[in-house]
């Protein structure tokens, strides 16, 4: 064995895991064929949320009259927005490179594609390497559906859309999930006409219907055209236009974003040579300690089935590090994974949805209220949305919570902390909340339950 550990992929699980293992005395080889930092830094969280901030600034300026402020004509310089985005991405990428340099000589970085050529044997950069432990953090990429005409339609994915320097006259978005919704609203606020198409009957299909309806109403109010329960039969380029043909007609636009999901980067990984089992979609199957079907081989991050979020990948590295160091700790199936769609208002959730609770036969009490019932929401003009929490009737523990509203991604962490600590909802009910804040709305929400009514 020429190293102790091989890590394939320098994403949000692979990079910190490699650095920590090297600091713990292991000889580590880290292979990365593209940019350091993975999807999050380069094409995911960092660039999209940076551009979303610009889009929100345009929206706030454009709608400032509702607060008694005249802002004048709003013009978006998309080229400047993209330059700012690229600068922020560069900053985070540089920070990743610094951390790897700080790891010292025990960590060797190979900038090349890595693939298995045998059990725990990897080829990268024309060299073969073997190790007792191999960790796969190969990530995922945008999935392109098999639609007639799509190859010649000039379709964009999240990366290429963020490289445009002129605002598209009419952006057609295929997919109503997190990515599709974030980009639809972003480019509508930049000034594009936007049509969003999804085969489902609502946006954000993983959420409860009331949650989906809340963001649907916001989109309608901003002039985003929604084509739901609509299956695309083919796509074509007609001069300067792209045409999406539906069973009930067609949608024409200038640009097409395809955001229908992501596929794992296992096509050229050499999984067969390593003895790694994949599921029907190509994801690497793992157990509660990230072990694959191959002895000594582990997988983390988006290449595994499950939630594809940066915070989930980063948590993967913590759990696997403890396992590799012989420590106890949480299992993969025991963790809470909160989620947030960075639309405006944000959509955040942790734990069970109502739909999941009913499907599993889990008893619950529900507290619900409109976001506009929060004093600060009224004062700031951020009234859109709702709050909902599910409580175990027997133990008073929080089973799940969903928030659509201003800073929902921040607010959901109150419930995350309560649930992680195993505390009851009374911990929020009895807390002294600052007034006026959005957070006191969480207390007001729970006080709507009969057991907590004052």
Image (tube, helix red, strand yellow):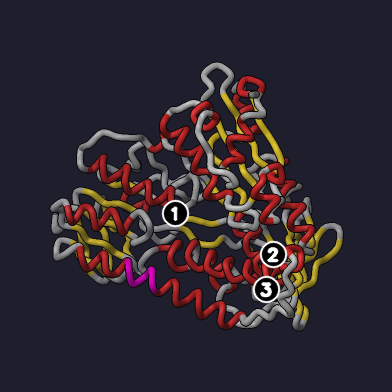
Q: Measured from the top left, where is residue 113 in percent x and y? A: 34, 67
How crowded pointer 1 is (Cα within 10 Å; few <14, some 14-19, many 20+) is rated as many
- Please report the residue visible at 62 percent of the width from the left and 43 percent of the height from the top: 403
147 horizontally vs 113: left or right: right
Looking at this view, name the residue that lies furthest to the front: 435
Q: Mark 2 points at which residue?
A: 173
Q: Is mark 2 on a helix, strand or loop?
A: strand
Magenta span of residues:
91-95
| Left or right: 359, with 199 as reference point | left
Whether pointer 1 and pointer 2 mark residues with C-beta atoms closer than 8 Å, the reply is no
Residue drawn at the location 25% of the way across and 71% of the way down: 126
In this figure, which residue is indicated by the disc labeled 1? 310
Q: Nearer the viewer, mark 2 or mark 3?
A: 3
Relative to 250, residue 1 above or below: above
Please report whichever mark, 3 or 1, sits nearer to the chain's N-terminal start: 3
For the residue labelled by badge 3, is the local secondary structure a helix, a strand or a loop? helix
Which quadrant is home to the N terminus?
Answer: bottom left
For the residues labelled 1 and 2, the Cα–Cα distance comes to 23 Å
Q: Which of marks 1 and 2 is nearer the N terminus?
A: 2
């Amino acid at each position: 064995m020429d190293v102790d550990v091989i890590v394939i992929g320098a994403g949000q699980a692979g990079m910190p895991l490699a650095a920590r293992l090297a600091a713990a005395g292991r000889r580590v080889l880290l292979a990365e064929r593209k940019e350091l930092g993975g999807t999050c830094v380069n094409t995911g969280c960092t660039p999209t949320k940076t551009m979303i901030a610009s889009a929100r600034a345009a929206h706030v300026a454009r709608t400032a009259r509702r607060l008694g402020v005249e802002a004048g004509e709003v013009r978006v310089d998309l080229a400047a927005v993209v330059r700012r985005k690229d600068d922020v991405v560069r900053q985070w990428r540089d920070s990743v490179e610094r951390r790897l340099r700080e790891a010292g000589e025990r960590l060797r970085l190979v900038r090349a594609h890595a693939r298995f050529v045998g059990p725990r044997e990897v080829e990268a950069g024309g060299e073969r390497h073997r190790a007792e432990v191999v960790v796969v953090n190969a990530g995922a990429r945008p999935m392109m559906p098999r639609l007639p005409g799509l190859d010649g339609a000039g379709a964009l994915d999240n990366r290429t859309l963020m490289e445009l320097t002129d605002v598209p006259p009419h952006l057609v978005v295929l997919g109503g999930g997190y990515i599709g919704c974030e980009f639809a609203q972003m480019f509508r606020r930049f000034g594009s006409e936007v049509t969003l198409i999804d085969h489902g009957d609502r946006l954000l299909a993983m959420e409860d219907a009331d949650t989906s309806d809340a963001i649907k109403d916001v989109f309608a109010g901003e002039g985003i055209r929604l084509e739901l329960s609509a299956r695309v039969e083919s796509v074509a380029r007609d001069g300067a236009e792209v045409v999406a043909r539906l069973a009930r007609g067609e949608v024409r636009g200038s640009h097409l974003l395809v955001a229908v999901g992501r596929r794992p980067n296992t096509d050229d990984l050499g999984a067969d040579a390593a003895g790694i089992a994949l599921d029907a979609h190509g994801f690497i199957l793992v157990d509660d300690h990230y072990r694959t079907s191959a002895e000594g081989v582990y997988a983390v991050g988006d290449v595994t089935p499950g939630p594809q979020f940066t915070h989930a990948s980063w948590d993967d590295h913590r759990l696997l590090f403890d396992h590799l160091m012989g420590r106890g700790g949480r299992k993969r199936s025991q963790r809470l994974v909160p989620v947030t769609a960075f639309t405006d208002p944000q959509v955040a959730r942790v734990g069970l949805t109502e739909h999941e609770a009913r499907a599993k036969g889990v008893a619950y009490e529900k507290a619900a209220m409109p976001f506009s019932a929060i004093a600060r929401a009224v004062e700031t003009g951020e009234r859109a949305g709702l709050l909902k929490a599910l409580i175990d009737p027997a133990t008073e523990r929080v089973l799940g919570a969903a928030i659509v509203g201003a800073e929902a991604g921040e607010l959901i962490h109150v419930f995350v902390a309560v649930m992680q600590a195993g505390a009851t909802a009374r911990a929020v009910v009895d807390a002294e909340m600052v007034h006026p804040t959005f957070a006191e709305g969480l207390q007001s929400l729970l006080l709507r339950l009969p057991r907590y009514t004052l």
